[in-house]
Image (cartoon, rainbow, N blue to C red):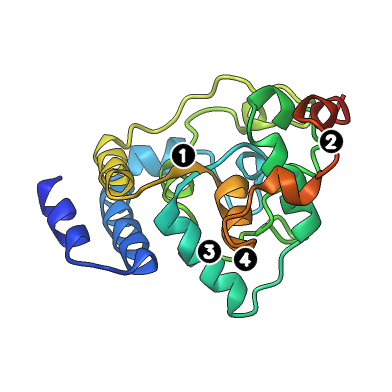
Amino acid sequence: MNDVIKKLRKLSSGPRRARLVHKEVDKRVGALFQDSAVMRNVSCRQGCSACCHTQVSISDDEGELLHKIIEDGHNIDLERLKKQSIASKSSTTWYRLSYEDRACIFLDENKSCTIYNNRPSVCRTNHVVGDPKDCSTEDGLERSVRLLNTFEADMVVMAGYSQCEENGALPDILYKLINGNKEVLDLFTPHKSITQVFKEFD
């Protein structure tokens, strides 16, 4: 991965670094899909959005890219992002949100990604091998699923993360960027403790 890291270090723009990582990830994942057995056994298809209701990690470079897309006019549900940003502090709290409130803010009514070409790295590497019913978290439970081995692509993702100051949950990083890096909890619930906020999800 040294070649990828060298390329990343030459770039001063977060969105450009994110796009480079995405390109390198796609190259490695695409090579796997040249195998007919992979094509046959991966059950992910357009319209399946189960993983779009789970917690997604991003780098701050990817956060900058998504922030730029929003600034350029891409509409999102900011209230839902606020809820997600608080819940993303804890896996338990995240799954207390309703299935609808856990939907990625970039998911449309047809269960399609509205920023597919700029989706985060982990969305590019997660491919389920097996029954897609196991991916569902509608009941608030996360089950074990078998994923396609994307080791090389995962190493590219880690190379990208290593060049960033912060990596974390998409809602948390993005909401802070939108609000000028102010604390999400101070903005959303200035008069409540974190314990009170979490209780509201029960």
Residue type, label 1: His
- Earlier residue among tags 2 and 4: 4
Reading the image, the residue beneath label 1 is: 127
- Earlier residue among tags 1 and 3: 3
Q: Are marks 4 and 1 in contact (CB under 8 Å)?
A: no
Of the two numbered discs 1 and 3 in the rendering, the one whose residue sits closer to the viewer? 3
Distance Cα–Cα, label 2 vs label 4: 34 Å
Q: Are marks 2 and 1 in contact (CB under 8 Å)?
A: no
Distance Cα–Cα, label 3 vs label 4: 11 Å
User: Is residue 19 visible in this depiction of the protein?
Assistant: yes
Reading the image, the residue beneath label 4 is: 114
Residue 1: percent from the left, percent from the top? 15, 45
- Quadrant that contains the C terminus: top right
Count of numbered badges drawn on the protein: 4
Q: Residues within 10 Å of mark 1 (few under 14, many from 20)?
A: many
The residue that appears at 83% across and 36% down in the rendered structure is 98
Distance Cα–Cα, label 2 vs label 3: 29 Å
Q: Residues within 10 Å of mark 2 (few under 14, many from 20)?
A: few
Secondary element type, mark 4: loop
Label number found at residue 66: 3
Distance Cα–Cα, label 4 vs label 1: 19 Å
The residue that appears at 69% across and 56% down in the rendered structure is 105
The residue that appears at 47% across and 65% down in the rendered structure is 65
- Earlier residue among tags 2 and 3: 3
Residue type, label 4: Thr
Of the two numbered discs 3 and 4 in the rendering, the one whose residue sits closer to the viewer? 3
Secondary element type, mark 2: loop
Label number found at residue 192: 2
Secondary element type, mark 3: helix
Residue type, label 3: Leu
194 and 15: which is toward the camera: 194
